[in-house]
Amino acid sequence: MTPRGAQTPVTPSDPGDSLLQALVRRQWTHGGIDEIAMAEIAGRYGVSVGEVRGVVHFYAFLDDASGVTHDIRVSDNIVDRMAGSAELMALLARETGLSPGESRGPARLSFTSCIGLSDQGPSLLVNGLAMARVDAGRAAQIAERVRRGESVSRWPASWFTIEDNVRLPGRLLRGAFAPGEALGRARRIGSAALLDELEASGLRGRGGAGFPTARKWRLCAAAPGAHRVVVCNADEGEPGTFKDRVLLANHADRLLEGMAVCAAATGADIGLVYLRGEYRNLLDGLEGAISRLRAAGVIGDGFDVHVHLGAGAYICGEESALIESLEGHRGVPRIRPPFPVTRGYRGHPTVVNNVETFIAAAMVALNGPGWLREEGTPQSAGTRLLSVSGDCASPGIYEVPFGISIAEVLERCEARDTRAVQVGGPAGSLVPATRFDHRISHEDYSTGGSFMVFDDSRDLLDVVTNFTRFFTHESCGFCTPCRVGGALLGKRLDKIAGGGGTRVDVETMRQFAGVMRSASHCGLGQTASNPVMDLIEYFPEAIDARLCSMDYAPAFDLDAALREARELTGRDDPRAHLDRSEA
Amino acid sequence: MTDKVKVATVSLAGCFGCHMSLLDIDERLAELVERVTFDRSPFTDKKILGECDIGIVEGGVCNAENVEVLREFRRRCRTLVAMGACAINGGVPAMRNSFSVRECIGESYVRGIGVEDPQVPDDPELPLLLDQVHPVHEVVRIDYFLPGCPPPADTIWAFFTALLEGRDPTYSYRQIHYD
């Protein structure tokens, strides 16, 4: 076996295939992967059955039994909750007779992490296909067809319509060009000039971290390797983000051309799009765009692009976990350095960029370095697509210049009585009204685009508990601070929400958060305590009003814990009881 | 005599192994009793707890009496320490947490091998079992945790020395590295 991280040869047909892709296809065709299928696939890929089982169990969208015909997953993001996803779940359970979370039988019902439809919730996936705005009437119709066992392929196509909800298009969304134009200019000026222009343009990664794109491309171009790889990170998993959904649906051509421009700049020959499993409904469109661009000669000659599908794992948005997933493994982040630019996909130098970054790069290649600088701030050139959702009259996509204040965005989306905004998703920041004058930019609030609005009626403890549960669920389980820390935070939040919390619990959460921040293996664990810490810092009243004691109290009812023994012995004397209030 | 630090110790749902380990500090016991005096403790057989500086709890919380004793320790001890795996995690006694109280009692007193005159003990003198065994910090506030199963004598000594000198106890990696 080749050691992980060593460069391995890639043949032209190879990049479209991996163990994970075989499992994803099997899931579609057979409604799951049973032990027999696992053994067969293990033989085909030359790995142990144990490894296959490990991959199947890692990804939420893979089942270890075959024959699942109706797999309904209700989006569990807080904004979907606010739109009624809990009621939707209850209704579906009642009407179908299924119990949520039960993992047996041909029809299944469960919650899943944000599926990228926060602007049109409550939303769900049926066999991986997205459905938005599922009201009570539609839910009853769904349940009826599930009960009848009707194949999802026969359900009305109109049920699967997704709105774009572009509320404010800017230069990026409005930009257009004929296929090959951007790549043509990139080739004419040559890779050195192209990289200089990209650097001068000030383009920084749009995934959230804001790494200078030109520097990343240069590092990859300079790294030795038999192949170079361009990867588009379309694993838009940060709850509340959905701008890549719209870009992939409407601007796939420009995305692919941006990848081709990157290939021209870096000398890459392999292109991969990692499409999150939740966006399976966008697969056909994306494949269509690939065919079109192959026909137009933009890709296919010396640089071709293949699509990989994710299978429901937020952590795969982290670039090194994404590469592990592309190679077919469990999505566990790698130790960095080495960074992907020197050792990425199958050990080859790899550029991983966000969807929006590639489109912006294509626009810079076409229009030159000044195009982006016409808007934005010195450190943050250009515009930013915000995915606005929650308590506002017009949720959807807003393309805004970097440097816009949070207050201005709130005005644009017609939000009223706003108590807080979660900028950058759960891993970002919970921003109180006193800080609404702050700006969306790399200098101030940096964001991957998620912008969730909460008004006065919302309980922020609920919001933060939802985020904390999300991180706990999505932890890859590799390191203890993240795997255990998230669960411990969740327990304390439940204790506070249940009226049993104390000052000691708040201090304990601070300690947990400190350990998670400093000792977690990757960004997921390092940021998973942000919501709790922001709540403690900016909204102490949301916690303090619920505390039952400034000292300490148990999280459970001690007297109730004796009930079973009382029933068993028939006792009810004073010593058969414990006083809850007495500490 | 009066300026000695007062220490109380107790074993709840534990095996007294932590207490035995404390005795393993050997000749340092002499040094210890120079500086501390023991209040309620298996070492003294005192049944009534006085006002103490340090309380050390071995074992988890499995029944109503454990709760009462633990609460009393919290009320009377300025600093309360959870000592050993059972106090910190529930330990071996918590292995019953995947069964109901009915199943546990049934196994021991009704259906178990060799049980004569099967019956559920219901004397009011006996403390009732909680439905789950809990670590002590789930019932009262705990100031310090002293890990180990049992914590080795050197670790216990390092802990005591630090506490008596008014420092926050810290352990070297070796002292709490158990696998």
Image (cartoon, rainbow, N blue to C red):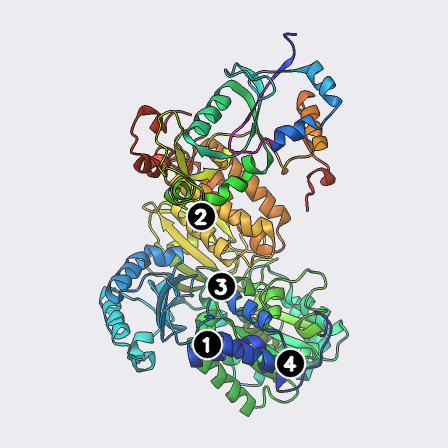
What's the CA distance linking mark 4 and mark 3? 24 Å
Q: Position of residue A34 (x, y in %)?
A: 47, 75
Can residue A450 be seen? yes
Q: Residue at x 50, y 15 (%)?
A: B48
What's the CA distance linking mark 1 and mark 4? 26 Å
Q: Is residue A88 left or right of residue B92?
A: left
Q: Position of residue A221 (x, y in %)?
A: 72, 74
Q: Do marks 2 and 1 both belong to one polypeptide chain? A: no
What's the CA distance linking mark 2 and mark 3? 36 Å
Q: Is residue A22 above or below residue A164?
A: below
Q: Secondary structure at mark 3?
A: loop
Q: Position of residue A67 (x, y in %)?
A: 39, 76
Span of residues in magenta: B7-16
Is B80 part of what is drawn in magenta? no
Q: Secondary structure at mark 4?
A: strand
Judge the density around disc 4: few (<14), some (14-19), many (≥20) Cα neighbours within 10 Å: many
Instruction: Pick whichever, B108 or A455, lies toward us.
Output: B108
Which residue lies under the disc numbered 1?
A: A27
Judge the density around disc 1: few (<14), some (14-19), many (≥20) Cα neighbours within 10 Å: many
What's the CA distance linking mark 2 and mark 1? 34 Å
The outermost residue toward the bottom is A295
What's the CA distance linking mark 1 and mark 3? 21 Å
Please tell me whether mark 2 or mark 3 is closer to you in this view: 2
> Sequence order check: which comes first, mark 1 or mark 3?
1
Where residue B98 is drawn, which disc sits there?
2
Q: Secondary structure at mark 2?
A: helix
What's the CA distance linking mark 4 and mark 2? 52 Å
Q: Residue at x 44, y 29 (%)?
A: B67
> Sequence order check: which comes first, mark 4 or mark 3?
3
Which residue lies under the disc numbered 4?
A: A270
Q: Residue at x 51, y 30 (%)?
A: B12
